[in-house]
Image: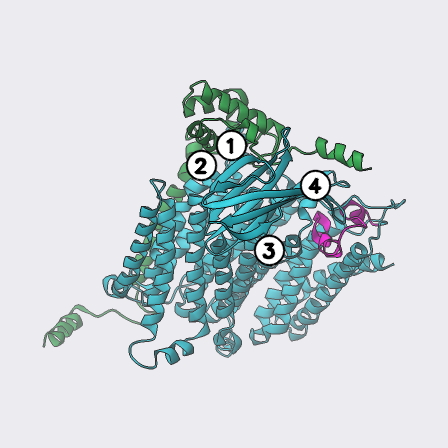
Chain colours: A cyan, B green
Amino acid sequence: MITELGHFALILAFAVAIVQMIVPLIGAQKRWPGWMAVAEPAAGAQFALTALSFGALMWAFINSDFSLKLVVENSHSAKPMLYKISGTWGNHEGSMLLWVLILTLFGAMAAWFGGNLPPSLRARVLSVQSAIAVAFFAFIIFTSNPFLRLETPPFDGRDLNPLLQDPGLAFHPPFLYLGYVGLSMAFSFAVAALIEGRVDAAWGRWVRPWTLAAWIFLTIGIALGSWWAYYELGWGGFWFWDPVENASFMPWLLAAALLHSAIVVEKRESLKSWTILLAILAFGFSLIGTFIVRSGLLTSVHAFANDPERGVFILAIMAFFMGGALILFTLRAGAMEAKGVFGLVSRESALVVNNLLLAVACFVVFVGTMWPLLAEMFFDRKLSVGPPFFNAAFTPFMVLLGLILPVGSVLPWKRARIARAARPLRYAFVLALAVGGLAWTMQSGRSLLGPMGLFLGAWLVAGVGVELAQRTGRGAGRWARLRRLPRADWGKAVAHAGLGVTMAGIAGLTAWTQDDIRVAQIGQPWDVGGYTLTLNEVNEVRGPNYQSTQAEVILSRDGSVISQLSPEKRFYPVARMPTTEAAIDYNLARDVYVVIGDQQDNGGWTVRVYVKPLTNWIWIGCGLMALGGLLSLSDRRFRVAAGARKTRATPVAAE
Amino acid sequence: MKRLVLILMLLASPLAAVQPDEMLADPALEARARELSKGLRCLVCRNESIDESNASLARDLRILLRERLVAGDTDAEAVDFIVQRYGEYVLLRPEVTGANWLLWGAGPLMLLIAGGVGFVYLRGRSRATQAGETPLSPEEEARLREILKD
């Protein structure tokens, strides 16, 4: 019964979405307040109905309702409760339902908190947002219905893919989707502004919090996913340049660019058409990501439902929204005249360079991701594009970005003299050189990567320090002034420092990882990278829905025990799949990562040990970036309805 | 039941990448083999190198690669040997030949184009005048210079 209610609610939500797509748009065109006002309750109703539907599906998973096809295929009665809940979105149909749930949530938020928007803009934004929802409701109902029943329900389910039975699944996809789908708000604002025919500073101010929120969620989602891969997949990589990872990374890069260009729109009324284009493309890349994951066109570790029919459907959605928005863009972009005047050397120019680097870096990732497909279609070459390509082709852009960032962020607006603005940074530069040099001398004749990464990290963090010192002047009262800095400035400082920390972490991990593979006998110690490890015992353990071979490894240094690690090798009988559960001793300087393998003929066990310096900096840096975003989001100027009054002046009528 | 599980475990346990019995005794040679196998794709996996992969085919390739190195092949010869048998699909780093120039050139080329467009835009902005402002006439400019000289 509850299942049918959920199904019915989904169809009702679809109907409401259609109404919300059409009525407010006509209302905004004809200036009928009643018609425009439909959008607000409709957005709320749409969200409530979708939430009801999602709740019904989750109910079926929690109660292991095996009359539901989806539950049978992805659940098992012996599965721990956490994974029953998170299993709701650990499959294609359920994850699409989560996708639209978040889409409608953003629509409802825009309706509830959009009180300071001019009515016609708000109506158009909600209408465009609802158009996206209509497309995805249709997609779910016609190609991927999660509420299909089985005629003869089996006694038990087929269990969830064991790799997904991890707390990571509970958090990684929801955050990622909040990010992906959050970009739909930027898209809706861009298209609404194009229909409206005006983009001004107020528009920049409205669109920025949404982009910022989406970017924060994407940052957290990507970081969680990479951390999950790091501890779960068993060889301690954190990023694989897998098509699906790239699919989440491309919108992240563009959202980062959009954040910065929206500042220029807001403060200087320039870069308007570029910002609109970025907003359209950022969401476009979200759709491409959805397409890549669902169509099975590119092989990836994130194997989802690979169904050509679904792929075609999403391709059609993508073609419609991207095509429509870009046509509208070419028709209207000319009308958006830039107002601000600024010199070649200025904060504005620095932000243009930032956008340039981020957008081109995104383009490189895009070409690399699609190249196997293109090469096969047009040049009849079956080839692979793997991590070595991306590391070589992508990294230079990030190095360049890191090099210019501290300089760009201290440049004044409008017109600047670079020598004068950058002069205080010389201390930061010397400090960074010293850190890089120290790393260079301490490592023995290996690549430049490690020292370069540490140099960049130190340069970014020290640059932030110098900038804060500059902002607060000299003498007494500095701390008070520091505390009074606007939250947005703090956000900028923390996020930029976070980028530096992440860069240093990536370089440290990539350049200085030590690994050791051997057959370890029980009780015989061995050394890896200054640590001593001893395999104490290996036991068979039984988990709720798996068998486990659990080892006990003692990690010590100079005779004193640091920790006891328990790497596991699990086997899930229902899914017939083995997984490795690495044991990791975390700390700020390094991770010691231990994996247990098979027993050998001579009675020993294969043990793999990695010592990975600075690994946790990667995720600490991501956390700082997200925190910076949050600080910026909480800035006062987004809360007060500044700019709203100004736009009451009659907008240019759209023909 | 326990025996069944054990059998299943044996069947389904191609666990964990490089095995100790594959490794070469000479550390220098082994290091070369590890480095090379990071650039070779496991053909039956989804986007994994043979160094990371658990599949048995990846194991065969790892052993084959090490045999070539022991036989005295250079790095390039050993990789060529595998490419000749399995096609360029095994290379995770696409070769810079033919159409792949497009792939490798895409980034730098785009940076040049975007940089050019960006520069033209920025120059336009720095030369643009505020709306409603008229530039100074030559006489006014001369007068301004007079005033500033004092």
Residue at the spot of label 3: A176
Spatial CA distance of label 3 from label 1 is: 30 Å
The answer to whether mark 1 and mark 2 are in CB contact below 8 A is: yes
The amino acid at mark 1 is: Ala
The amino acid at mark 4 is: Glu
Spatial CA distance of label 2 from label 4 is: 29 Å
- How would you rate the neighbour count of disc 1 (Cα within 10 Å): few for under 14, some for 14-19, many for 20 or more? some
Q: Nearer the viewer, residue A407 or A501?
A: A501
Q: Quadrant of residue A14?
A: bottom right
- How would you rate the neighbour count of disc 3 (Cα within 10 Å): few for under 14, some for 14-19, many for 20 or more? many
- Give the mark nearer the N terminus: 4 vs 1: 4
Q: Secondary structure at mark 4?
A: helix
The mark tally for this picture is 4
Q: Residues at marks 2 and 4, common chain?
A: no
Residue at the spot of label 1: A375
Q: Which residues are magenta?
A: A68-94
Q: Secondary structure at mark 3?
A: helix
Spatial CA distance of label 1 from label 2 is: 9 Å
Residue at the spot of label 4: A309
Predominant SS along the magenta part: helix
* Residue B132 visible in the shown view: no
The amino acid at mark 3 is: Leu
Residue at the spot of label 2: B103
Spatial CA distance of label 4 from label 3 is: 24 Å
- How would you rate the neighbour count of disc 2 (Cα within 10 Å): few for under 14, some for 14-19, many for 20 or more? many
Give the chain of mark 2.
B
Spatial CA distance of label 4 from label 1 is: 23 Å
Q: Quadrant of residue A7?
A: bottom right
Q: Nearer the viewer, mark 2 or mark 3?
A: 3
Q: Residue furthest right?
A: A152
